[in-house]
Amino acid sequence: MTENALTLVLGGTGKTGRRVVRRLTGRDEPVRIGSRAGGVPFDWEDQATWMPALRDVTAAYVSYYPDLAAPGAPERIGAFAALAVSAGVRRLVLLSGRGEEEARASEKELQASGADWTVLRCSWFAQNFSEDYLLDPVLAGQVVLPAGDVGEPFVDAEDIADVAVAALTGEGHAGRTYELTGPRLLTFADAVCEIAAATGRPVGYTQVPAADYAAALREHGVPLEVVDLLTYLFTTVLDGRNAVLGDGVQQVLGRPARDFTEYARDAAKAGAWNRKLA
Ligand SMILES: NC(=O)c1ccc[n+]([C@@H]2O[C@H](COP(=O)([O-])OP(=O)(O)OC[C@H]3O[C@@H](n4cnc5c(N)ncnc54)[C@H](OP(=O)(O)O)[C@@H]3O)[C@@H](O)[C@H]2O)c1
């Protein structure tokens, strides 16, 4: 972008954020990681941390934690976007979710901020299986979820980061909402099969009723709000509304989205599933 432009990457150590940071630093673009452990700490729960993180920033990648479907997200996104604009930020790129009514409210807050905004409406991340809550079940050899035969076009976080960097640094993305998905619909069982093939280890998939899934999470001490969020994501968002491909990766990058097979092969090669469960 412009010389000396500083980009704030919220969630800059997370699944998408750290890939955005890697790309920007690779291009010698000045970057500030926005997270609780960042050099200038940023905490969504503590508004006093927001302004110091925004100092001298001209563009920001906004990945919210824990999820835009969580209660209070639109209010926080709205307050953050307003503060960012008042601090001189001109460009805001929001990581959003596909088919989530709750996420729409946050998108609207961003759009009302007066910044040049871009929304990245993403399907389920492939990296949930290797870097998040589905990693341990894969390592245990059995993934148990309330997801049935609905197809989901899992998107690779590498593609999300490529698109985010284009929107943060390039022209022509202001006022645009991009639907980012992979190139193919897979059920969760298909995805687990792909991972088993890539690792050469047996990994099974079992579908359970949503109520049983929620009860098992509670038994394992998962906080109620996280249980509610996961149950919502695995039922409402997977009711078939998202079983279509989006073309955002092709639109922005001029190339097809990465396929799940490629993701599984690369993650296996990088040792994502080599660890043994304690
Ligand atoms: N996963 C999916 O399939 C999916 C699909 C569509 C959309 N999304 C959206 O993606 C977003 C999450 O993005 P992601 O998966 O790239 O991130 P992630 O891996 O879930 O995020 C972890 C990051 O958030 C930071 N963080 C945690 N608590 C924080 C807090 N209280 N304040 C500030 N930062 C905090 C962490 O750093 P510290 O620990 O240092 O704070 C870390 O940098 C959510 O808003 C979700 O709605 C997810």
Image: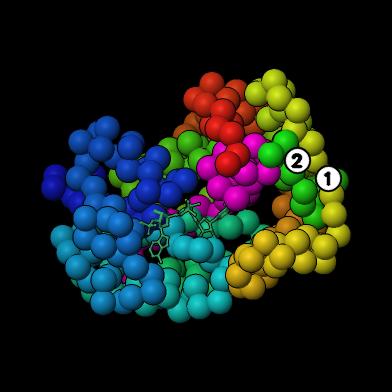
Q: Looking at the image, which residue sits at the far front? A: 278
- Image position of 30 (left or right of 162): left
Specify which label sits upstream in the sequence, 1 or 2: 2
Instruction: Mark 1 and mark 2 in contact? Answer it, CB < 8 Å.
Output: yes
Q: CA distance from mark 1 to mark 2?
A: 7 Å
Q: Which quarter of the figure is the C terminus placed in?
A: top right
* Vertical arrangement, residue 60 with respect to residue 272, above or below: below
Near-viewer residue (189 or 117): 189
The residue sitting at 56% across, 47% down in the picture is 132
Residue at which label 1 appears: 206
Residue at which label 2 appears: 142
Near-viewer residue (211 or 44): 211
Label placed on residue 235: none
The residue sitting at 71% across, 25% down in the picture is 201
Q: Which residues are magenta?
A: 113-139
Q: Position of residue 261 (x, y in %)?
A: 65, 26
Q: Is residue 237 magenta?
A: no
